[in-house]
Image: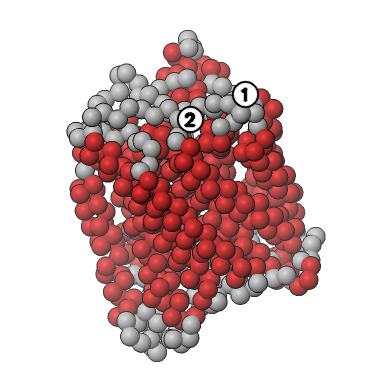
Amino acid sequence: MMSLEIKKVDKRDAKLSMAYIYVAFIALAIGGLMGLLQTLVRSGKLQLPGGINYYEILTAHGVLLGLVLTTYFILGFQFAAISRTAGTLTNKARITGWIGFFIMVIGTISTTIMILTNKATVLYTFYAPLQAHFIFYLGLTLVIVGSWVACGAMIATYIKWRKENPGQPSPLLSFMAVTNSIMWIVATLGVAGEVLFQLIPWSLGWVDTVNVLVSRTLFWYFGHPLVYFWLLPAYMAWYVIIPKIIGGKIFSDSLARLVFILFLLFSIPVGFHHQLTEPGIDAGWKFVQVILTFMVIVPSLMTAFSMFATFEMFGRSKGAKGLFGWLKKLPWRDARFLVPFIGMVAFIPAGAGGIINASNQMNQVVHNTIWVTGHFHLTVATTVVLTFFGISYWLIPHLTGRIFTKAMNRLAIFQAICWTIGMAFMSTSMHLEGLLGGPRRTAYTTYGDAKQALDWIPYQVAQAIGGSILFLGIVLIIVIVINLAFFAPKGEQEFPVGEVAENAEKTPLVLENWKIWLTILTALILIAYTVPFVDMIQNAPPGSKGFKFW
Ligand code: HAS
């Protein structure tokens, strides 16, 4: 029985999605305020009141924006995408989604309380030997377990659709959401292992040492796929929703699915590229993982090609002439298109920066400098977050039964201009200061009056200017979200889902043969990690005990 295409997300599923999205934007508001304070402190213009520890607000900023905002928004968006394209969730799946939500919320609140009471000033990567209160680690574990429960509900809905439609490729948006969920589950096994078997026993005093190299390796086994867990929902919008918004077609269903499969395969066995300067890891294995890192660049380059093709195909269909005539045909006054498009453009320098990061010799120049901070403020804080804002402009009114008004559209465009200007100041000056050796994760005050630090001050002032403009952008997006959720006029806002171009190739079913892809993924992970990981344990530093995790 072919499932009829659903045009509107079921009200009960909409409530579930919005619950996740509300938490995401609360995290944005709190985490964004922390970011503003950080840039003001680093410019030397602000002393935090009441002896607030700079690294406490830095931890709050990273956890709330890097982990909470992203994970909650993504799960909320994916639930809506699956309900819209694979069909309304069953009661069981929806209850499971709510269980996952409440487990995550309990974890988020506990973690946040530990951070804001200075009991978990360990930054968002919580690197040992920095130690937090065990409730911080327990809270993070709940967030991860809750997200697994939520992903389980999505995967169950996808499996139900596949059973009801044998021999049919699944709806593209659902396939993408499920691929991202599977990648998230496989990647979070690493950080779950680190927290459960190392950091919680250590923070409870059950063991008195921790194998730092093992803990960092388990974190970065998770940490790089984490960035693609953020990126892929943005790609979901670029591939499937933007073509509908501009009035065009999806360039190729199978190319889009292949891109997601390539991310699934190559985003996990690459964590050593965050550890290139780390001793204790054989250079040969670092080399293997850098090669795999360069493999994971390919699906992004394929995405660039596909987006240009989508735009050009649409422009030509409207009579565009000349090499770039199609640019004129794009809906520049529609924030639902313009805001994600700015994210795409930002991803060109952002991705180039990533390639520099991954190039071993150049990584020696930029590692642990504020260049890296500039990189991820372009990737996640611009490409991904601006796309999330662009999604919100139609998704929130769709889910709450309201419309995206002309006034909010204008405000959304102004917000994106603020974001672009603020980020241009902040990220550019971070990249430049990083090339001058300016370290990341340091408050201005720790520089003292060292001569070299004085060279960095102009860049930090530029970061404070950029950070202040960005904070205005955060205030604006919160105003827009509150308006769209609670005050915009009632009405029908479309959940745009693109159709595939007529001349696109038929989608090969092998792209949904999960046995093949999960087998290759497991093989790649074992090839990339088994030998170096065993080496780290066998040659653990003196004093380690037991599994030499400690
Ligand atoms: Fe990264 C560090 C390498 C992508 C986020 N990255 C980080 C950290 C974060 C982060 C948070 O190899 C810091 C972690 C920490 O706290 O220490 N990154 C890469 C590489 C890529 C990459 C090779 N990163 C991302 C994405 C992120 C992200 C995406 C978030 C969403 N990154 C690294 C490395 C480090 C690192 C090292 C460690 C550095 C160190 O030493 O600590 C690649 O995926 C990039 C591929 C992308 C491209 C660009 C393709 C362009 C596209 C847009 C086209 C535009 C169109 C619009 C079509 C090659 C797809 C039309 C345009 C017109 C003009 C018309």
- Residue 11: x percent and y percent? 48, 37
Residue at which label 1 appears? 333
Distance (Cα) linking label 1 and label 2:
19 Å
- On the rendered structure, is 489 left or right of 242? right
Q: Nearer the viewer, residue 489 or 183?
A: 489
The residue that appears at 48% across and 30% down in the rendered structure is 495
The kind of secondary structure element at disc 1 is loop
Residue at which label 2 appears? 495
**Residue 492, above or below 157:** above
- Residue 383: x percent and y percent? 53, 42
The kind of secondary structure element at disc 2 is loop
The residue that appears at 46% across and 41% down in the rendered structure is 12
Residue 193, quarter of picture: bottom left
- Residue 268: x percent and y percent? 35, 56
Residue 39, quarter of picture: bottom right
On residue 451, the disc is none
Quarter of the picture containing the C terminus is bottom left
